[in-house]
Amino acid sequence: MKYLYFDEIDSTNSYLKREYESLEDMTLVCAGHQTAGKGRRGRKWEDDKDSLMFSILLKKDIDAKRSELLPLLSGVSLYSLLGKNHIQASIKWPNDVLIQNKKCAGILLEAVTKEKMEAVILGIGINVNNASFPENIRSKAISLYEAAGRRFDKKEILNQFVSEFVKYYGSYLKKDDLFLDVLQNHSYLDGREVILNYYGEDRHGKVLGIAKDGSLLLLEDGKETKIKSGEVTLEHNYH
Ligand code: BT5
């Protein structure tokens, strides 16, 4: 892994999207603050000085279909590192890591595509030592500090993430998806009644699990369906 650091940048994902051609595979760019931190679908990622934000550029053996597994693989890497720090987390398909039902980390996968997919950028935001959050996310965000009652060394968290990620990504490149076992045992949505917003349409069902290709398996009107992407809300939290 090659490391770059900026005290402040618009977004580590946007930086790698701009510079991917001249940078090596497995370049990691980390920032102290993002002025335009991105979530999915135009949403914002909030940070303060206690947050950890970074993106990893992947250029080797890019397989568009399999790259959809990478946010889940990153979620499992986060889950494992948190476990090593005695924090029990769970992975919420497709791209969140939760502690006590609140989001402590978000993952944003972006692809650079010309004639074919040239690169994949995996952006990760972790609430590490944050003691408070902006009003709009206060009820749904949590930091590792809040969960564990102690502060963490952000650099150490980053190193621990990288060592988990490298392990799972190495097996992913060999098409041996080690991380899927962990995911299937620690998936937050398993067995829950959910509402899945799929391109503007609400679908209701019970989550059966996660398939080997990373899709969510949903029981809808007695029928099993495979969902590739979408936003999931728990049925009882909806109103
Ligand atoms: C995500 O999007 O969760 C992906 C977040 C990825 C952030 C990283 S930071 C490094 C890299 N560079 C970037 O510019 N981005 C990546 P999504 O599932 O769309 O969730 C966004 C929603 O989560 C927001 O609309 C808020 O409701 C909530 N949110 C925003 N900031 C949060 C935070 N710090 N903690 C918890 N929830 C937050």
Image (cartoon, rainbow, N blue to C red):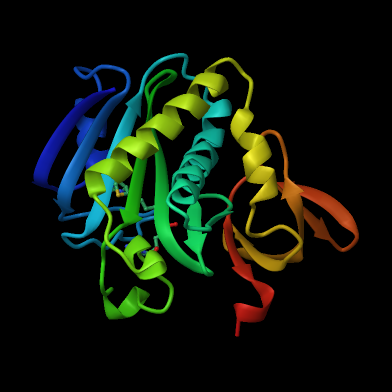
Q: Position of residue 135 (x, y in %)?
A: 29, 80
Q: Is residue 1 left or right of residue 58?
A: left
Furthest toward the right, the residue is 222
What's the residue at 34%, 54% (across, down)? 126
Q: Is residue 65 visible?
A: no
Q: Tell whether 173 sits left or right of 135.
A: right
As rendered, which of 168 and 25 lies closer to the eye? 168
**Residue at the spot x=47%, y=14% of the render?**
61
Please name whichever residue, 8 or 116, is drawn nearer the observer in this view of the structure: 8
Q: Residue at 62% of width from left, 27% of height from top?
A: 177
Residue 14 on image: x %, y %: 24, 40
Decide if residue 97 is on the left or right side of residue 119. Answer: right
Query: How far across and how far down the image is residue 74, in percent?
Result: 47, 40
Residue 47: give x, y in percent of width and height: 23, 61
- Residue in view at x 56 percent, y 35 percent: 69
Q: Quadrant of residue 144?
A: bottom left
Q: Is residue 122 above or below residue 21?
A: below
Q: Is residue 28 visible?
A: yes
